[in-house]
Amino acid sequence: MRRICEDRSLVAILVLLAVSAPAMEAQTADPDPARFDDNIAAFGRWDAKNSVPEGATLFVGSSSIVYWNTAEAFPDMTLINRGFGGSHISDVNHFIEETVIQYSPDVVLHYAGDNDTAAGKSSEQIFEDYQEFVKSILTAKPGTEILFISIKPSLSRWAVWPQMVETNELVRGLTAKHGNLHYVDVATPMIGADGEPFPELFVRDGLHMTPAGYDIWNRVVGDALARIH
């Protein structure tokens, strides 16, 4: 019975992805994913020396995932962190077998899209890439719970925040239509009453987060994971 339910879930999400794809304009070229070959090889070497837990909660995406001490933040969960800094969603999709699917996780947390926007990709292009990510995960394991951690505001990329908001809203709309998909809003608590990001949440580069920034993520993401687990 569980297998039948999962098959129906997969059919439903694939249909939803097909009908929700926006009309695409000219796309910005994806960067070469080969720049991360060394990172992916390092994951493989680690796996060869360590046992990999089954049914884990897996974090994947760009530098905000890399610098996040997820094991310390969520000590009672079986976690895998497969972030690689500077990545776009297209890069995550390229290496999805090596970074996600081979581990057969029960829950996947995704953070990317930040670098994509800064590189000039449109919200529609980024959303299309995220839909490809979802389709790949649910085709491999239909019952997977997928959490999209909203693209965060930052001081250094504040000029493109409106485009990031657009992407977040596209993903929020998709997740509202399917039970396996979840939208985790880390952006709202990072913005003050003046409508701008709290400066103390960022290190000197204005992009990466201080422990105070991760404290917000730990709380918001922790609440979302608690609801799922």
Image: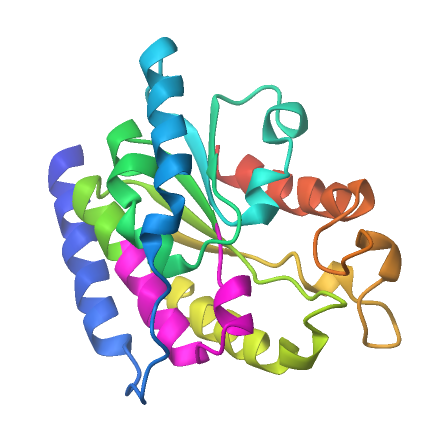
Its colouring scheme is rainbow
- Above or below, 16 relative to 160: above
Residue 1 in view:
no
- Above or below, 27 relative to 209: below
Residue 74 in view:
yes
Residue at x 49% of width, y 57% of height? 112
Residue at x 33% of width, y 81% of height? 27
Residue 32 placement (x, y as % from top left): 33, 59
Q: Nearer the viewer, residue 114 or 213?
A: 114
Left or right: 187, with 174 as reference point: right
Left or right: 96, with 193 as reference point: left
- Above or below, 225 relative to 182: above
Residue 34 placement (x, y as % from top left): 32, 50
The quadrant holding residue 141 is top left
Left or right: 88, with 77 as reference point: left
Residue 205 placement (x, y as % from top left): 76, 57
Residue 165 placement (x, y as % from top left): 58, 76
Residue 61 counted in the magenta span: no
The quadrant holding residue 53 is top left
Q: How many numbered dots are placed on residues in this image?
A: 0
Magenta region, mostly helix, strand or loop?
A: helix
Residue 130 counted in the magenta span: yes
Which span is picked out in magenta?
111-134
Give the position of the N terminus as an image quadrant: top left
Residue at x 50% of width, y 72% of height? 119
Residue at x 40% of width, y 27% of height? 42
